[in-house]
Image (tube, rainbow, N blue to C red):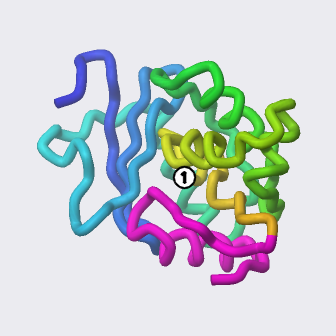
C-alpha cells in the first residue's frame, strides 16, 4: 500500500504498463510491468497534477514527440554513490550513450564499473533517468532491470536510435 502523502497512477506504454508515484513535488518512482504485475497493483490510484504531467510527458516520449522530461525527480532511497550515478545518468540526453566504465571514470572511481552497474540496476525512476543509455564499452547490452529486461532495453535504445549489440 502507498502512504497517504504519496500519489499513484498507472498508464499504458509500448513496453508494458507503467506505475508512477509522487509526493506532490517530485516523481519518486517509475516501475515497468514485469510478468503482468506492478509493485503497487493492490493500491488504488491516487492521481495528482504532477503525475498527470509525467503521464503526458511519457506519452509524448513514447510517441516520439518528446526528447527530454521536465517533471522533477527525487528518489527517496539510495546511497550517496547510487545518487551520484543517477545524477550522471540524468545528464544524458535523448540518444546519448555511455558505458559503465565511463560513468565510473566521470565519478572519479575508475575500476568501479560493476558497482556502477549495481547502482544503475537500482535506479527507481527508469526512462525519466535514462539508465537504458548505458552499455558495455563495446556497445553490448549486458542487462536491464526494468520491465521484461533486455527486450525492454532494446526497445528503448531503438526508440532513441542508439546503436547497440546483443
Magenta stretch containing residue 146, yes or no? yes
Q: Nearer the viewer, residue 27 or 106?
A: 106
The quadrant of the rendering that contains the N terminus is: top left
Q: Is residue 85 above or below residue 14?
A: above
Quarter of image, res 90: top right
Tell me if I can see residue 7 in this picture: yes
At x 66%, y 52%, the residue is 130
Q: Nearer the viewer, residue 25 or 105?
A: 105
Q: Secondary structure at mark 1?
A: helix
Q: Is residue 78 above or below residue 45?
A: above
Magenta stretch containing residue 5, yes or no? no
Q: Is residue 65 left or right of residue 3?
A: right
Q: Which residue is mark 1?
A: 56
Q: Position of residue 147 (x, y in %)?
A: 40, 63
Tell me if I can see residue 54 in this picture: no
At x 60%, y 30%, the residue is 82
At x 71%, y 40%, the residue is 112
Q: Residue furthest left?
A: 42
Q: Is residue 49 above or below residue 95?
A: above
At x 22%, y 42%, the residue is 40
Magenta stretch mostly in which secondary structure? Answer: loop
Q: Is residue 158 left or right of residue 143?
A: right
Range shown magenta: 138-166
Q: Position of residue 13 (x, y in %)?
A: 44, 67
Q: Position of residue 91 (x, y in %)?
A: 80, 41
Q: Position of residue 21 (x, y in %)?
A: 39, 35
Q: Is residue 81 above or below residue 94?
A: above
Q: Residue furthest bottom?
A: 166
The quadrant of the rendering that contains the C terminus is: bottom right
Q: Is residue 91 left or right of residue 113?
A: right
Amino acid at each position: 500500500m502507498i502512504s497517504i502523502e504519496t500519489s499513484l497512477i498507472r498508464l499504458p506504454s509500448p513496453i508494458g504498463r507503467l506505475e508512477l508515484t509522487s509526493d506532490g513535488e517530485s516523481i519518486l518512482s517509475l516501475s515497468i510491468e514485469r510478468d503482468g504485475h506492478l509493485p503497487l497493483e493492490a493500491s488504488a490510484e491516487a492521481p495528482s497534477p504532477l503525475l498527470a504531467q509525467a503521464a503526458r510527458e511519457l506519452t509524448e516520449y513514447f510517441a516520439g514527440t518528446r526528447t527530454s522530461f521536465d517533471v522533477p525527480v527525487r528518489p527517496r532511497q539510495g546511497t550517496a554513490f547510487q545518487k551520484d550515478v543517477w545524477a550522471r545518468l540524468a545528464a544524458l540526453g535523448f540518444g546519448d550513450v555511455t558505458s559503465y566504465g565511463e560513468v565510473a571514470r566521470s565519478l572519479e572511481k575508475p575500476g568501479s564499473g560493476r558497482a556502477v552497474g549495481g547502482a544503475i540496476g537500482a535506479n527507481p525512476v527508469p526512462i525519466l533517468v535514462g539508465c537504458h543509455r548505458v552499455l558495455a564499452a563495446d556497445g553490448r547490452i549486458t542487462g536491464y532491470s526494468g520491465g521484461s529486461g533486455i527486450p525492454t532495453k532494446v526497445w528503448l535504445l531503438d526508440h532513441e536510435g542508439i546503436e547497440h549489440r546483443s
